[in-house]
Image: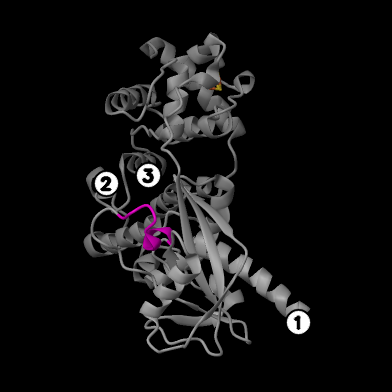
Amino acid sequence: MFTPRARVPFRESLLAWFRQFQRDLPWRRTKDPYRIWISEIMLQQTRVAAVIPYYERFLERFPNVQALAEAPQEEVLRLWSGLGYYSRARNLQAAAQQIVARHGGEFPLDEESILALPGVGSYTGAAILSIAFGARRAVLDGNVARVLARLGAIRGDLRETKPWQSLQKTADELLDPQSPCDWNQAIMELGAIVCTPRAPQCLLCPVNKFCRARQSGEPESYPAKRKKRDAVQITLAAAVFWTAEGKTLLLPPPRAKNGKPAADDVATLVSRMWHFPTVAVRENPPEELRSFLGGILSSKNGELSLEPLGKVRHAVTYRNVTVLPFRARTARLPAIRGAKRIPLKELSTLPVSNLTRKIGRAALAELAHAVAKA
Ligand code: SF4
């Protein structure tokens, strides 16, 4: 993309900008590989502002690898609850356990051991190696790829193997060998706050004079948009048990099944965490929910009265989920193997998905209102 001679002023411009204008973020105040690793995993697919409070709470509770490795998984998931993509939390703990078992609790220093950790791919590995240890490894994720594609006016689907490999080669060539830590953060920062997907701020960009997409007059049109997968509509029905004392009932985290789950797989949609009794429905939601409950209740509860509550909508990647919550009216909470009985308003003391939180919040507002009116 640039000749070796042109790389020098390019690097100087970007690094000078970063050193002057970088955001003050908690993970930029440390070189501890454990803390950098946690931040990189949390930042995957998640905005910085959303990550900061989770990052701080998580590290307060698990200040080192040992603490994370030894914690109950439920506690790890509870502290992740609301951040989404829960396999990240499960992988983090599995990786911490691997570090304790194979590396005596010390974060490994070599690339091979870091890449062998669950949930650590080439991007995260390069970020940890360069930021914590100053290693010459260039990061390449979606943000960096977009910046590089614009600088070189490259079009097409960057995630295809060949373009991606070519971008990795470019990223490796551009990496500042004297400051790989600052360099990687600088190019990520540029993609995050200046060269944003829809509205690149070329006038404020420290490397605008090097950019071919800007010269074209339509920088935002690079690279070409990725084709979106068609959205799938899913309808679920959920039973919200509610006693006079405001208690409800949640089912335990479902086990992972073998093979690829269906789009409306409830276990996936509730992120394999505590959840309201829920079933995917098609034609007659209350009847389908009643039949589902009949299959899991360990005792006969007679005819369950199911009263519809307000709909809840939720989007996960390509799935548009509509949940139809029903108040399940019974004198006493039924017996269901492994279920937990808790006050509905204390839902967030358990690890639950965003979907379950939304159902709980909506139901609580409606039921509390009904009680106040009675
Ligand atoms: Fe991105 Fe514009 Fe800077 Fe080019 S000039 S890198 S398009 S912000």
Residues tagged 1 and 2 counted as in contact (Cβ below 8 A): no
Name the disc covering residue 374, or none. 1
Residues tagged 3 and 1 counted as in contact (Cβ below 8 A): no
What distance separates the C-alpha of mark 3 from that of mark 1?
58 Å
Single out the mark in the foreground, 3 or 1: 1
Where is mark 2, residue-wise?
115
Single out the mark in the foreground, 2 or 3: 2
Badge 1 crowding class, 10 Å Cα cut-off, few under 14, some 14 to 19, many 20 or more, is: few
Q: Residue at 44% across / 15% down in the picture?
A: 153
Badge 3 crowding class, 10 Å Cα cut-off, few under 14, some 14 to 19, many 20 or more, is: many
Which quarter of the figure is the N terminus placed in? top left
Q: Position of residue 302 (x, y in %)?
A: 47, 88
Residue 267: in magenta span: yes
Q: Left or right: where does residue 277 sit relative to residue 17?
A: left
- Mark positioned earlier in the residue sequence (3 or 1): 3
Residue 142: in magenta span: no
Q: Quadrant of residue 181?
A: top left
Q: Which residues are magenta?
A: 261-270
Where is mark 3, residue-wise?
128
Badge 2 crowding class, 10 Å Cα cut-off, few under 14, some 14 to 19, many 20 or more, is: some
